[in-house]
Amino acid sequence: MSRRSPSEVEGEAPRRHSPEDEAPRRPPRPEAELRDAIGPRISRRHSPEDWADELAASVSGPQVINDSKTPSGTVHVGSLRGPVILDVIARALRARGVQTTYLYGVDDMDPMDAQALLTPDAVERYMGAPLAHVPDQAADGHASYARHHAQTFIDTFDGLGIRPDRYYWMSEIYPTGDLDPYIRLALDRATLVREIYVRVAKVRHPDEWHPLSVVCQQCGKVGTTIVTAWDGQRVHYECRPALVTWARGCGNSGWTSPFGGRAKLPWNLEWAAHWSLFGVTIEPCGKDLATAGGSRDRSDAIAREVFEREPPRNVPYEFLNIGGRKMSTSRGRGAAAHRIAEVVPAEQLRLLFLRPRPNQAIEFDPQGTDAIPRLFDEFDRLAEATAGRQVRGELPAGHASLFRYSLLDPDTDLAAEAASFRPAFGHLALLLQVPGVDIEERVAAEKGEALTTHEQAALDVRVRAARAWLDAYAPEASRLEVQRERLPAAAGELDLDQRAFLARLADEAGARSPASGEDWQTLIFDVARSNGVPPRRAFEAVYRAFLGRPNGPRAGWLLASLEPGFVRERAWEASGWTVSGGPPDPIPVGG
């Protein structure tokens, strides 16, 4: 559940590479050997540490899981966390043989309250109108403002492997009369509803307030109306000019039937009505709704006391923050979901939301950082661990389940997928900036054999993502320009130990003929160790000699992207060059 209520808010109560990052990875194991080694472990489908599997093991009987969204503007990438979490819950339930229905709703009868997202001529007329009744500001063929923004968001679902069994739109549900029984109950028990607001949330409505908002028969607004009386068949409402600060009512008043789509429930009651109407058994929600006395507590109490049913199981989840700030759809803050999905492929985007447990916040700032490459690196690390290879750093609990749930297809052969060869994202971004490089040929050489059809398809996806990242998000440090014409002036700042390292590197490269990024990375570490040069200083020497700056992409892959002869010549040249004063005394190779 991802909602906000404009009409009831009162009372609501760039990291650089480290030497550890540069450490080489072990070469892949043959797939047949891999299957023998990890098959039994992978076949145990439920890791006891995984929260989704824990949840699935704790329920009985058929399950209906539900989520919904208010389409108040361009939907940011953080809003995908809820749908991904629900998809994982559905997968975990179905893996245990539990009959499961996944619903996703669009709350398009909520009032428009995002003035900045309307054209100036539309502000006075449509602020406070149901989102479903606001014309599409983009004029691109959608029936309404709500349809434009909701459909743009929903269109990202299939590409992420999120496939609800049914979508519903509240603008279509209300006219059917399906919610009329709940409207009647809410009006008949208005005194109880007001008491619940006071008891649970310390929000006091006036005695005349009834839990319903009528669509004004004159101006068509719903956010500016208040129901003041109910006679069992009709309600009396007023469209007040100053009921809310963000919209102006027309002053109309009168009696009307509240049924058949002429009115909507306040969203705490509407939420509870969803649960009864659809038989919802599990509905996660954002932590802002799950605070003590907050929206979830209100709706839970309304479900029990007004609609007389137990509320569904809750799985509160934290936000995705950019720069420490929660993203906001109505305020237009945060990267658009469909834009991020164009840069981050489905499986890595799923991992973004699943890597922390739902109750942990996600810090993600793609602009001008290496956040996206690091997301790919974490995915690859999980794959390697699932494949039984050693990886650096602490693994999350249930890492094999985490990798499995990050995959697009729930029926994927996990052993085969874990065994697949994956070129590092940062390496691909580097290769794309080197003129004349045949990416497929270079990656196959790094693997040591031709790519499989599946690996080739995955490579194509990564190449597109790396291009998009370079175009839209990459920091300047990741933009590569090898100084081929002459030795960079920055090489003059190398100390004697670094120059001795480069001389030894040139000789060892000639003797060992490294081919892949892993080979070069290992060679750099070996030479640095034998010369007593700290890894960080060794990498700096490479960057100064080839890029003219003290930092850059992974050094092994940088050198692997260049011609071996050029690498040896430049390393040797940098080992004996200074900005002024001519060459220094000879540096003994290896000395």
Image: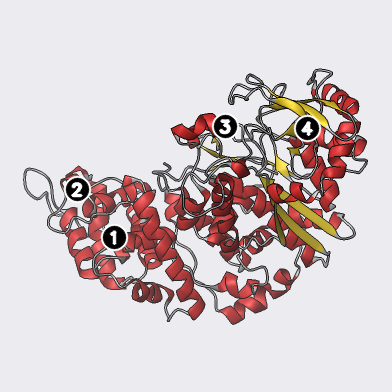
Whether residue 179 can be seen here: yes
Q: Which quadrant, please, contains the C terminus?
A: bottom left
Q: Which residue is mark 1?
A: 433
Nearer the observer: mark 2 or 1; the answer is: 1
Q: Which quadrant, please, contains the N terminus?
A: top right
Residue flagged by tag 1: what amino acid is it?
Gln
Per the image, label 4 sits on a secondary structure element best described as loop
The span from disc 1 to disc 4 (Cα, nearest Å) is 60 Å
Residue flagged by tag 3: what amino acid is it?
Met
Whether residue 393 can be seen here: no
Mark closer to the chain start, 2 or 1: 1
Q: Nearer the viewer, residue 431 or 504?
A: 431
- Residue found at x 39% / y 48%: 473
Does 185 sit left or right of 176 as displayed? right
Does 341 sit left or right of 248 as displayed? left
Q: Which residue is mark 4?
A: 212
Residue flagged by tag 2: what amino acid is it?
Ala
Nearer the observer: mark 1 or 3; the answer is: 3
CB atoms of marks 3 and 2 within 8 Å = no
Q: Which residue is mark 2?
A: 491
Q: Nearer the viewer, residue 385 or 494?
A: 385
Q: Position of residue 249 (x, y in %)?
A: 63, 25
